[in-house]
Image (tube, rainbow, N blue to C red):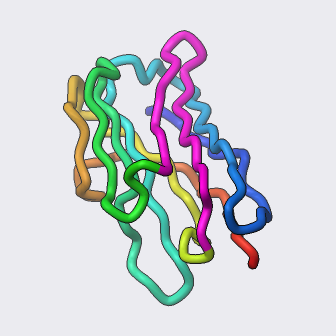
């Protein structure tokens, strides 16, 4: 089973940037589609971004398109989320997830991801 741990969260001013990392251990994620989700207080968990197992395809929620970039480094067994032009409404706990079915093209559905990290808090202040 793959274990995922997110890092890079923190407090940032609106308009600033953060880069989240998701380090995997236990097995390689090279054949897994990966995703980032987030959950704000009192809200449902929502899709943020996903990347196919090959890295050739990426998809984003409309709310982050053009501001966030998902990428992967299979040699480092790590997935990243570069977040620019952060807004107050980006405040949430961010979760990394792996689609452990293998060779996935990416998904916006949390139910497609079988392994999750504990999350990292991102707080955007005015």
Residue 58 % position (x, y): 30, 35
> x%, y% of residue 33?
31, 32
Q: Which residue is drawn at 58% across and 27% down?
A: 25
Q: Which residue is drawn at 38% across and 48% down?
A: 49
| Magenta stretch encompasses residue 101 | no
Q: Relative to 9, say whether 2 is above or below.
A: above
Q: Quadrant of residue 106?
A: top left
Q: Is residue 96 left or right of residue 86?
A: left
Residue furthest to the bottom in view is 42
Residue 35 screen position, x and y as percent: 39, 44
Q: Quadrant of the C terminus?
A: bottom right
Boundaries of the magenta span: 67-87
x and y percent of residue 89 in the render? 54, 76
Residue extending furthest toward the top: 75
In the figure, 108 relative to 89: above or below?
above
Which one is in front, 2 or 38? 38
Query: Image check: 101 left or right of 122?
Result: left
Residue depicted at 56% across the width and 27% down the height: 78
Q: Quadrant of residue 91?
A: bottom right
33 left or right, relative to 66: left
Q: How many marks?
A: 0
Vertically, is 29 above or below 84?
A: above
Q: Which quadrant is home to the N terminus?
A: top left
Q: For residue 79: magenta?
A: yes
Name the residue at 33% across, 46% down. 114
Note whether 91 is above or below 56 in the view shown: below
């Amino acid at each position: 089973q793959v274990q995922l741990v997110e890092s890079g969260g923190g407090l940032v001013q609106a308009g600033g940037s953060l880069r989240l990392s998701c380090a995997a251990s236990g097995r390689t994620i090279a054949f897994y589609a990966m995703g980032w989700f987030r959950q704000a207080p009192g809200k449902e968990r929502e899709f943020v971004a996903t990347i196919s197992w090959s890295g050739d395809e990426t998809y984003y929620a409309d709310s982050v398109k053009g501001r966030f970039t998902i990428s992967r480094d299979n040699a480092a067994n790590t997935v990243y989320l570069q977040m620019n032009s952060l807004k107050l409404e980006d405040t949430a706990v961010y979760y990394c997830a792996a689609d452990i079915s293998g060779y996935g093209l990416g998904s916006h559905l949390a139910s497609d991801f079988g392994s999750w990290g504990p999350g990292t808090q991102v707080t955007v202040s005015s």
